[in-house]
Image (spheres, rainbow, N blue to C red):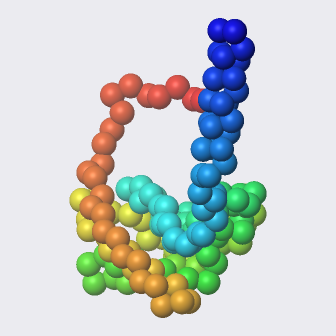
Amino acid sequence: MKFILNKYLLMIIALSALFISSCADEIPTKYVPQPVVEGILIVDEPIDNIKVIMTQPVTVKYNYYKSMIKDAEVIIKEGNNEFLLKFNYDTLNPGYFLENTDYKVKPLTDYYLTIKLNDGTLLKGYTRTPDRFSWSRKVKDT
């Protein structure tokens, strides 16, 4: 009798757990894309490879090239200089760059980034470049 009672109790607990777990909320599928900016200014190097990307939902397969925003207005200001960057359609390394490769990033200088997207979204950023450095020991070739 005790064995039958335990069997019914176990069955009631299992059915209750199944009922409770089936009452969960739906998986959220609403998604609001957000712009993301990725870039590095390296002292004594040209301005290159500034990426403006739109995030993608987790419910679809990620596509790196599809996430790129290729028609933004990207401007970098340094002192009295203002540079309009162009998009590089190179499939290996797409991104915004400065056509004038004679201009090199200066040490200990403030750079202001302004990006205007076609939908009117305005993104702004600021950085101060570090001083030049020298290696005390040369890094091994990788």
Residue at 65% of width from left, 15% of height from top?
A: 6
Q: Quadrant of the N terminus?
A: top right
Q: Nearer the viewer, residue 126 or 57?
A: 57
- Residue 84: x and y, percent? 48, 83
In the rendered view, would you say 39 is above or below 72? above
**What is the number of callouts on the image?**
0
Q: In this image, 102 relative to 88: left or right? A: left
Dividing the picture into quadrants, the one containing residue 89 is bottom right
Which part of the image, by quadrant, shows the C terminus?
top right
Q: Is residue 116 left or right of residue 72?
A: left
Residue 110 image position (x, y, % from top left): 26, 68
In the rendered structure, the answer to whether residue 105 lies left or right of residue 63 reads: left
Of residues 20 and 102, the one drawn nearer to the viewer in this rendering: 20
Left or right of 75? Residue 29 is right
Quadrant in the picture for residue 51 = bottom right
Residue at 54% across, 89% down = 119
Front residue of 63 and 28 = 28
Residue 9, image x, y percentages:
63, 23
Taking depth in this image into account, of 90 and 11 the one nearest to the observer is 11
Q: Residue at x 66, y 30 (%)?
A: 12
Examine the rendered structure and indicate whether residue 10 appears above or below residue 88: above
In the rendering, at what x and y percent does residue 91 appear? 75, 63
Q: Is residue 104 above or below residue 42?
A: below
Instruction: Inspect this view and state whether residue 95 appears.
Output: no
| Position above or below: 73 against 18 | below
Tell me the residue at 30%/58% (across/down).
Answer: 129
Give residue 31's quadrant in the image.
bottom right
Q: Is residue 41 among what the camera can see?
A: yes
* Outermost residue to the top: 2
